[in-house]
Amino acid sequence: MELSKIRAFALIEGTTLLLLLLVAMPLKYKLDIPIAVSVIGPVHGIAFMLYLSVLGLAFVDKNLTVLKLLVGAVAACIPFGSFIFERLILKPDASQA
C-alpha cells in the first residue's frame, strides 16, 4: 500500500468525522433534522472501516510499523486526529519527494 493512498484515506476519514460531528450532529440536536446523521453517519462508518483496512494492509505490506498502525487507529477516533496523523506521521521522506 502506497503512502499516498494511506494519506488520502486518512484525509477522507478525518473529513467525514468532522462532517458528522460539526454538521450532522448539530443539525440533528439543535435544529431537529435527524436525516443529516442518517446520511453522514453510514458514510463515515464506511470511511472509518476502509481507513482501518488500509492501515492494516499497509502494516502487512511493511509500510507501517506497529506504533504507526496503533497511532493511526487511535487518531481516527479523535477529531482532527487523522489530519495530524497524516501531516506529521505519514509525511513523505525527502527521498520520496
Image (cartoon, rainbow, N blue to C red):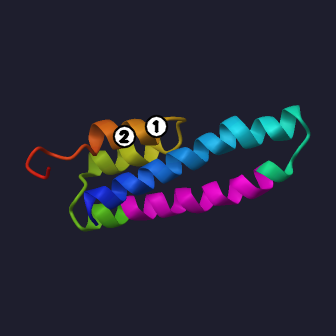
Quarter of the image for residue 67 reads: top left
Q: Magenta stretch mostly in which secondary structure?
A: helix
Horizontal arrangement in the rendering, residue 14 relative to residue 54 (left or right): right
Q: What residue type is labelled 2?
A: Phe
In the current view of this chain or complex, which residue is farthest to the left?
Answer: 95
> Residue 35 in the image: x percent, y percent?
84, 53
Instruction: Please name whichever residue, 22 or 70, is drawn nearer the observer in this view of the structure.
Output: 22
Left or right: 52, with 27 as reference point? left
Q: Position of residue 66 (x, y in %)?
A: 28, 51
Mark 2 closeness class: few <14, some 14–19, many ≥20 residues within 10 Å: many
33 left or right, relative to 48: right
As drawn, 61 above or below 70: below
Q: What element carries label 1?
A: helix
Residue located 79% across and 56% down the image: 38
Residue that appears at 75% across and 57% down? 39
Q: Does the magenta stretch include residue 84?
A: no
The answer to if 47 sits in the magenta stretch is yes
Q: Say which mark, if any, is on residue 72.
A: none
Q: How many residues crowd around disc 1 within 10 Å: few (fewer than 14), some, or many (20 or more)?
A: many
Provide the secondary structure element on which disc 2 rests: helix
Q: Position of residue 15 (x, y in %)?
A: 55, 46
The kind of residue tagged 1 is Gly
Q: Position of residue 10 (x, y in %)?
A: 43, 50
Circles 2 and 1: CB atoms closer than 8 Å = yes
For mark 1, what is the residue? 81
Placement of the N terminus among the 4 image quadrants = bottom left
**Residue at the image point whose x is 59% and y is 45% from the top:** 17
Q: Which segment did they paint magenta?
A: 37-55
Residue at x 37%, y 40% (from the top left corner): 85
The residue wearing badge 2 is 85
